[in-house]
Image (spheres, rainbow, N blue to C red):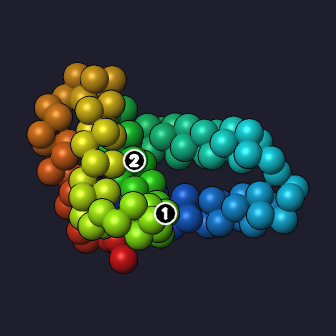
């Protein structure tokens, strides 16, 4: 796998997530069902990467980074509603995810923040 992991995960997540969002918006899924679908999607992507030799922690980092990129419109809306700059909202989300990944995978939180920040800067809108 020569591509950065996030470049492998991002289109896969986006395609499936878009389809599930359309089902949610049309009323075919309720909030609980959508959340369950989303969780299963993340787990299947994680397993897909691990089956290709990616470590557990790197797979989680790539998936969380891709999820952050796909969440940019929601983060932007939150920034507008709260009157807080988008960068601060993004940084809070990055810190929260980094803390969780560092705790779950026993990795350096600062390195995770740096990696996630790089993903958002490179692939975010």
- Front residue of this view, candidates 123 and 27: 27
Would you say 43 lies left or right of 8 here? right
Q: Quadrant of the C terminus?
A: bottom left
Marks 1 and 2, how far apart in space?
A: 15 Å
- Regarding mark 2 in the picture, which secondary structure is present there? helix
Nearer to us: label 1 or label 2: 1
Q: Quadrant of the N terminus?
A: bottom left
Image location of residue 68, percent across then percent down? 40, 56
Q: Residue furthest bottom?
A: 125
Would you say 55 lies left or right of 108 here? right
Which residue is at 45% across, 44% downward? 49
Image location of residue 94, percent across then percent down? 28, 48
Q: Which residue is mark 2?
A: 64
Would you say 28 lies left or right of 8 here? right
Would you say 20 lies left or right of 15 here? right
Q: Quick check: 5 above or below 98?
A: below
Which residue is at 31% across, 57% downward? 89
Q: Is residue 47 visible?
A: yes
Q: Which residue is mark 1?
A: 74
Q: Residues within 10 Å of mark 2 (few under 14, many from 20)?
A: many
């Amino acid at each position: 796998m020569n591509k950065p992991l996030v470049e492998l995960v991002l289109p896969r997540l986006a395609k499936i997530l878009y389809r599930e969002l359309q089902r949610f918006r049309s009323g075919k899924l309720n909030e609980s069902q959508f959340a369950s679908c989303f969780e299963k999607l993340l787990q299947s992507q994680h397993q897909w990467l691990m089956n290709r030799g990616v470590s557990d922690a790197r797979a989680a980092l790539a998936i969380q980074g891709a999820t952050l990129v796909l969440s940019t419109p929601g983060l932007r809306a939150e920034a507008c509603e709260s009157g807080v700059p988008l960068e601060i909202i993004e940084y809070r989300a990055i810190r929260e995810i980094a803390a969780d990944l560092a705790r779950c995978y026993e990795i350096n939180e600062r390195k995770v923040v740096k990696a996630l920040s790089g993903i958002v800067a490179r692939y975010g809108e």
